[in-house]
Image (cartoon, rainbow, N blue to C red):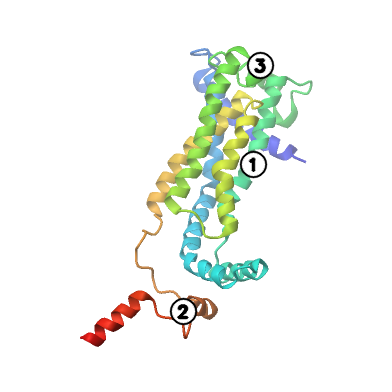
Amino acid sequence: MMDWIYTIVSKVLLLWHSLFDKLFGDGTWLATNWDWVLAIVFLVLTVRVILFPLFIKQIRSQRAMQTLQPQLKALQEKHKGDKETLQREMMELYRREKANPLMGCLPLLIQMPIFFGVFHVIKRLGTGTSDETLYGWTAAQFQSGMAADLFGVSIGGTFRDGGTAAVLCGILGIVMIITTYMTSRQMILKTGWSEDPTQKMMQKLMLYGIPATLIISAVAFPLGLIIYWTTTNLFTLGQQMWVLKKYPPPKMGSKPEPKVVDPEVAKALAPKVGAKPTTAAKRKTVKKNVG
């Protein structure tokens, strides 16, 4: 079922390896096979370049969601205690304004199959296999990948191998977890927490849930996969910094542009007829009469 993903990941990885192998040969420096390490790094760059247009759509969708916050608050007040009606009204608002609250997670969902593909391909290098020519590999390429090291540790090695592998995987694993948290935090600090319960739950999942799961799962990750994920995070931090500068969120306190509001929402926002005036309003009236 996933073979086509494993094949695509393998072909891109082997393409970059072939290029760097021609540039650097099979020599090593600092007990590292840089042709394989750079192949993993440029596999990340390839994926990120392909997904960049989708990332731009994600930012634009988030901006659209921000402009809807006043209307969302009004709907929540109007349908307090009626979740079914609230969800229906919110979906209608999203449809009418062409906003998609799920767009924030779409790039992540698309990257997950690629991540599993990288995990499978690199894990095979660490465990070995009787069928070395799967997914477009040659036997020579597979043997070269199995022998590839980063600072003397196999790119297929894991924390559970102990020794130097445990130290290197542990250090890079911590960097991976921290940078995963930083990528989500960077975006949320710039855009703010969503008023939409579904969107806010997704934000919390990305900010806290994913880094928390990595604390456990990173123990089983091969070193090559940790390199892949950490490189992805570092690239994402730079990419988000550029995009957020180009598409900045609305400034707090800035005057919003005039917008046609749904009559029902406007009714919910308007003061109720017959409502008692506030203390401030009473003072204003007394001052006017005295004058």
The label shown at residue 161 is 3
Q: Nearer the viewer, residue 247 or 211?
A: 211
Give me the residue at 60% from left, 57% from top.
Answer: 198
Disc 1 secondary structure class: helix
- Residue 116 position, x and y percent, is 67, 36
Give me the residue at 63% from left, 36% from top.
Answer: 213
Give me the residue at 28% from left, 83% from top.
Answer: 286
Instruction: Identify the mark nearer the N-term, 3 or 1.
Output: 1
- Amino acid type at circle 2 is Ala
Crowd band around label 2 with a 10 angstrom C-alpha radius: few (<14), some (14–19), many (20+): few
Q: Nearer the viewer, residue 208 or 20?
A: 208
Disc 2 secondary structure class: loop
- Residue 58 position, x and y percent, is 52, 54
- Amino acid type at circle 3 is Asp
> What distance separates the C-alpha of mark 3 from that of mark 1?
26 Å
Q: Is residue 291 left or right of residue 106?
A: left
Does residue 265 appear anywhere in the picture? yes
> What distance separates the C-alpha of mark 1 from that of mark 2?
45 Å
- Residue 23 position, x and y percent, is 50, 22
Residue to which mark 1 is pinned = 112
Residue to which mark 2 is pinned = 270
- Amino acid type at circle 1 is Met
> What distance separates the C-alpha of mark 3 from that of mark 2?
66 Å
Instruction: Identify the mark nearer the N-term, 1 or 2.
Output: 1
Q: Nearer the viewer, residue 127 or 201?
A: 201
- Residue 17 sits in quarter: top right
User: From the viewer's perspective, is residue 65 above or below residue 151?
Assistant: below
